[in-house]
Image (tube, grey):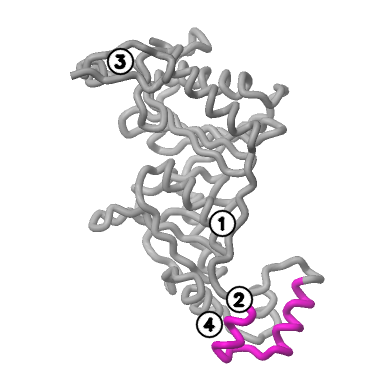
Amino acid sequence: MTVHCNEPFCYKNRSSLSSILKKGFYFDREWYCSESCFEMALQTQIRRRLVTRPDFDPQTRHMRLGPFLINKGLITREQLDQALNRQYETKANLGECIVELGFCSETDLTSVLSEQQGVPWVDDAAFEISREVLGLVPKFLCIEYHSFPFEISEASQETLLAIKSPIDYAFLHMIRKMLNCRIRPFLMKDDYFQMNLDRYLAGSHDDREEVLSLEANHQSILAQIIKRMGRYRVRDVRMAFYGELFWVRLSKKRSFYDLIIRVPELTIIAGSDGKSLPDEEESSARIAL
């Protein structure tokens, strides 16, 4: 039995024993026989995303919140107009404006959002956050996109994710790809969410931010990834793209190191947690074969 390299222009075969002995490299769970084939695949994906750089906007799949609340009898048309005017003035979320004006309680609003978006909600001020999930999602992404994992369900093999409305399904897709498991989102009241997010962040290691004076092109990004692969002796890489963000995860057994790159200013936010990889002596920016 032979295992074929996933680089289209590589005509070599490697026996299954090569994969078992961990020779070669893995990129998004696909095997590459050599450093050159791996770099070619990585470079192709980075270049493609830098050229296209699609915008991912949260998609509205359900009835809009205002009419939904009116149909439920929680607010009137006149109250919705007042809330929309407040939203225009403050640029705040419509739901927040409705609660601030006293037209609806936060509990009722969260319950309605749960029904509207088909997502369960957690009505618990201080639920338990499993130690297994600490650091699974870097702090930067949790703060930026108002979400954090709080439990891994062994029965359903899902990671449970607390998230604020509106739900960004493109972001959930990125999380699902990087964690390599199904994601089950849960809504939460704003005050409960912030309190538990702070608890999650307190249990995770701090992200380290570094602004590089480099041109935002595929060679620069590739060089940063290869440099850290050499530092941590890693052969398994996953990468996801979200708008102008590159999220790269370097994995070795049960340890990992995250590299988040924001384009075009090429800001690197490198995060790690309790499962972080040991920083081995770096003698070269090349991959250590």
In x, y percent, where is residue 278? 41, 24
- Report the Cα–Cα distance between label 2 and label 3: 53 Å
Asked if disc 1 and disc 4 are in contact, CB closer than 8 Å, the reply is: no
- Spot occupied by residue 55 in the image (x, y as percentages of width and height): 64, 47
Under circle 1, the secondary element is loop
Q: Earlier in the sequence, mark 1 or mark 4?
A: 4
Cα separation between marks 4 and 3: 56 Å
- N-terminal of the pair, mark 4 or mark 2, is 2
Residue at label 2? 65
**Residue in view at x 64 percent, y 36 percent:** 52
Distance from the alpha carbon under mark 1 to that under mark 3: 39 Å
Look at the image and give the residue range highlighted in magenta: 64-87
Residue that label 3 marks: 23
> Residue 285 colored magenta?
no
Residue at 56% in and 68% down: 190
According to the picture, the residue beneath numbered tag 1 turns out to be 146
Q: Amino acid at mark 2?
A: Leu
Q: Which residue is mark 4?
A: 108
